[in-house]
Amino acid sequence: MSTSLVTARGLTKKFGDFVAVDAIDFDVAKGESFGLLGPNGAGKSTTMRIVGATSQRTSGDLTILGMDPEKFGPQIRAHLGVVPQQDNLDMNLSVSENLYIYGRYFGLSRKYLKTKIEELLEFAQLEEKRDAKVESLSGGMKRRLTIARGLVSEPEILMLDEPTTGLDPQARHILWDRLFRLKEQGVTLIITTHFMDEAEQLCDRLIVMDKGKIMAEGSPALLIKEYSTKEVLEIRFGSERNSSMANQLREMCERIEELPDRILLYHEDGEVLLEQIYSAGLHPKTSLVRRSSLEDVFLRLTGRTLVD
Amino acid sequence: MSTDNLRRGSLEIIDSKKIISRGSLYVAQARLTAMFKWIWMILAIAVANPVLYLLSIGVGVGAFIDKNAGPAGIDGVKYLTFLAPALLATSAIQGAIDESAFPTLEGFNWWKNFFGMNATPISGNQIATGVFLASFVRVVGTVVIYWFVMLAFGALESSKAWLAIPTAVMAGVAFGSITQAIAAQIKDDNIFFVIFNRFIVMPLFLFSGTFYPLSSMPVYLHWIGWISPLWHATELGRYLTYGHAMTRDMAIMHFAILLSLLVVGVTLSRRLFTKRLAK
Ligand SMILES: Nc1ncnc2c1ncn2[C@@H]1O[C@H](COP(=O)(O)OP(=O)(O)OP(=O)(O)O)[C@@H](O)[C@H]1O
Ligand SMILES: [Mg+2]
């Protein structure tokens, strides 16, 4: 018996002629925290909706919790907790009613929900808003409520599509803490995010997607090792001079990326590189040595930055 | 967060068989919870609507018509009595449209909460049915209140008059279910309401034998009556509330048409809800 909770082979989704997800293969193991990374329009949300057993795939094989979502949608969804990219709360209802009614959709009892709602309100820091209409909540509060709602059924697999977009740092850390605990308890996480620190913190393994295809797969550390150098030197000469300098710098390092406001130089040892640059008589306005991150992997694979 | 340790997990706490059999009731519960926030408004409309219409047109315009019609009256009765069954069915349809069109447009276009529901074990079929059931409850309430106002106005003459309640409800929910199916297809809802109200609801209201018998309209407009749930319910209502002449076959046919519209509307909306959610 395999321990894989999600198995996708040649998974494809077309909207008319447009191929949003292009024959991708991946597995998600039980208890794993699996990430999808990619620029806008890469097909992450589309993939999430298919794995969430709502959107129907165009072709390919897909098994979730041992079942085909085309035939056993409700049975699969009974064990998923879904936090969609766009909040889709019931605006007719109050904060606590949203949690209650959502719990009812899972057939959960009044008694269970009564205590569960208290716990979730506390987690989402919405105790004082319990009777407020959802419409009156701030964007971040709505987001917290949507996340809390996804936990009401104690799901086996929690699917979060850019969960922390719009959250303040404190709320983000509370969520991360919660997700770590859930993971410890054996919950499987599937996450998309635009935040590299989030991906590095939360994901055991991730796929980088672009234009519906998988560009790379592995743990954050492995991806960094494979697609980047140990360190990165970021330097600025001022926006007019950046590109003329880039040519001179190209030979000094393994790889170079020119961004509108700065130049990234990839090298095993950033300080050493900076010394060389000074001794070549070049004087950047600012310089910063840092370790490579997923951001660099991303840039290398897709030619794009994640957060501009 | 302390209760995290008590986590049992969905595999233990969820019974998906139960959801598969009762899901539409959960959806109806959500709709009714939302509706009850407006209960005073809904009740006020349900009472004010018949009182105002029956007074102004039934009694007011009626006095004028009855004087000119002579002792035979319209269809053998006072104008109020003639008009009331049509208004009863109209109010049922109006209520059903409110509870079908708005939740469907909200669910798919404005707030997208149907996509939220569908991420749970709830299916598209169950969402469609749940919305329908909640609308049904509202229509029954509206019609029963209307019927009692008619009673107070002395517009009910037959002992079968209570049967006008189920026929009006039937017309309402039949129309509502078709509205629901159409609304499920809509992406641009501004145009939807303009077209729907001006070119469908208004003409049906005006040309369904509401204010005068269909037979007194030019023949080339009769088809509007035939496709209109309102006309079928009005005819049945007149038969039931004051004994408007009707053969048994005609009565059965009116009923059968309403029933077919209902079956088509519900089947279609279930299918279209499912299709749209699976995109
Ligand atoms: N319902 C739809 N109909 C037509 N095209 C769609 C639909 N949903 C998504 N697409 C297209 O599929 C592509 C992938 O969209 P998707 O939402 O999956 O991207 P994403 O990776 O989640 O992007 P983002 O980071 O912006 O959320 C996009 O080009 C999008 O326009
Ligand atoms: Mg997305």
Image (cartoon, grey):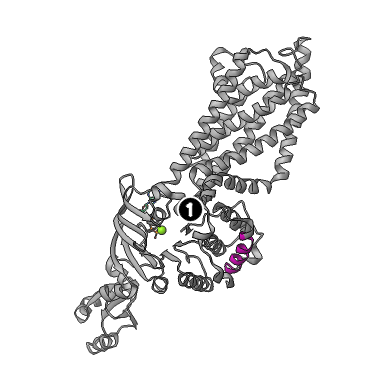
Residue found at x 54% / y 42%: B104
Q: Quadrant of the N terminus of chain A?
A: bottom left
The answer to if A123 sits in the magenta stretch is yes
Q: Chain of mark 1?
A: B
| Residue picked out by circle 1 | B119
Q: Quadrant of residue A108?
A: bottom right
Q: Quadrant of residue A302?
A: bottom left
| B82 vs B189: above or below | above
Residue found at x 47% / y 64%: A163
Which of A154 and B254 lies nearest the eye of the viewer? A154
The image shows residue B69 at horizontal and vertical percentages of 75, 11
| B232 vs A109: above or below | above
Which of B46 and B54 lies nearest the eye of the viewer? B46
For residue A32, side relative to residue A301 (left or right): right
Examine the rendering and report whether any part of residue A76 can be seen: yes
For residue A181, side relative to residue A138 (left or right): left
Q: Secondary structure at mark 1?
A: loop
Secondary structure predominantly adopted by residues drawn in magenta: helix
Q: Is mark 1 within 8 Å of ligand 2?
A: no
For residue B73, side relative to residue A149 (left or right): right
Residue segment shown in magenta: A112-124
Residue found at x 58% / y 65%: A120
